[in-house]
Amino acid sequence: MERDNLMHGARTALNTKPEMREWAENYLKEKTRAEMPELSGEDFEKYWKYHKPEIIHAGAAEAAMAYKNRERD
């Protein structure tokens, strides 16, 4: 239940703060790209285009935490 609340809060923040959403999208895109070095740039962009919503949904809490930690540094 706590994880669901954290994810819901993170997704709400991403949907209401455009600068945070942009940062989070870039963070998750770079992370995903690093996990898939076998794809060419073009193939990765195609992959990202179709999988972006589910990746952002699943990674919202992680991205929000990374965003907050970035502000502390």
Image (cartoon, rainbow, N blue to C red):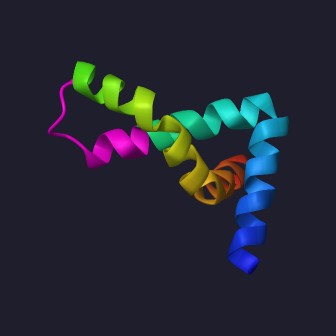
Picture quadrant where residue 65 is located: bottom right
Report how many numbered discs are placed on residues in the image: 0
Residue 68 vertical placement versus 53 (above, below): below
Q: Which x, y percent locates residue 72?
A: 73, 53
Residue range of the region highlighted in magenta in the rendering? 30-40
Q: Residue furthest bottom?
A: 1
Q: Which x, y percent locates residue 42?
A: 25, 19
The N terminus appears in which quarter of the rendering? bottom right
Seen from the viewer's position, the closer of residues 24 and 70 is 24
Residue 14 vertical placement versus 62 (above, below): above
Seen from the viewer's position, the closer of residues 35 and 3 is 3
Residue 52 vertical placement versus 7 (above, below): above
The residue sitting at 81% across, 46% down in the picture is 13
Queried whether the magenta region covers residue 43, the answer comes back as no
Seen from the viewer's position, the closer of residues 21 and 47 is 47
The residue sitting at 75% across, 42% down in the picture is 14
